[in-house]
Image (tube, rainbow, N blue to C red):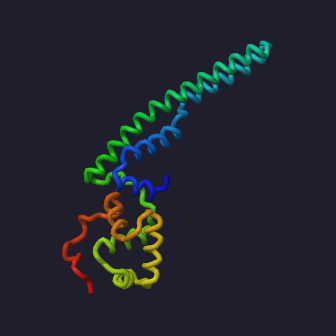
Amino acid sequence: MSNGGEALKLAHGETEQVATERATDKARTARWDLWVAILAYAVLTAVVLLKLEGFSTEIVALVAIFGLAMVWFMGWRRGKQLYKRFYDEELHQLQGFSRGGEAKASIPSPLTPRQTEIIDHIARGYMNKQIASKLGISEQTVKNHMSTILSKLGVSDRTQAVVLAIHNGWISARDIEPSELIKQD
């Protein structure tokens, strides 16, 4: 899932779905650990030794099939264990975000540092012309960045982009002074 899509789901309160997707991805990548690899090596070694000792192909094939089934079963069992652990961790973390908890390990931002800087200025109430002046870039460049930001986050306006950025910890609302929200020159 793209970070923007994941961020949009979190903004809509779909934490359990995001937790399920993240846990599934983590479990899938961590399924094969050291013990499964050792068992696979042991099965391969047994098959080779049996063949070298002159056992019939049928016996070697049965040992190989049984061994591979054990490797698959251990990997599947380990994957289920990891999934449960990862799901609990992700759900706990995401529920903390939805209750306004501190973003300790927020969703990685899909935005570049410059785009994040622009969203931060928008959150402070600056208009495109003011942002361009503060950052020493053209107003058209600010508009181009805004189009890219909206597209990456899958939102339709700057307010939604700011809400999403604050919600996911990419920018902080705490650093915004009330005086900054008053119309800037």
Q: Is residue 104 left or right of residue 30?
A: left
Query: Residue at (59%, 27%) from the top-left corner?
Result: 72
Q: Position of residue 183 (x, y in %)?
A: 24, 82
The C terminus sits in image quarter: bottom left
Query: Residue at (44%, 59%) from the top-left corner?
Result: 4
Query: Residue at (32%, 42%) from the top-left corner?
Result: 92
Comparing 136 with 11, the one in front is: 11
- The picture quadrant where one finds residue 49 is top right
Q: Is residue 39 left or right of residue 170?
A: right
* 10 shown above or below 131: above
Residue that extends furthest to the bottom in the rendered view of this protein: 185
Q: Is residue 49 left or right of residue 24?
A: right
- The picture quadrant where one finds residue 3 is bottom left
Residue that extends furthest to the left in the rendered view of this protein: 178
Q: How many marks?
A: 0
Q: Position of residue 172 (x, y in %)?
A: 29, 64
* 164 shown above or below 79: below
Comparing 164 with 155, the one in front is: 155
* 118 shown above or below 110: below
Q: Position of residue 112 (x, y in %)?
A: 45, 67
Q: Position of residue 35 (x, y in %)?
A: 54, 27
Query: Residue at (43%, 79%) from the top-left corner?
Result: 142
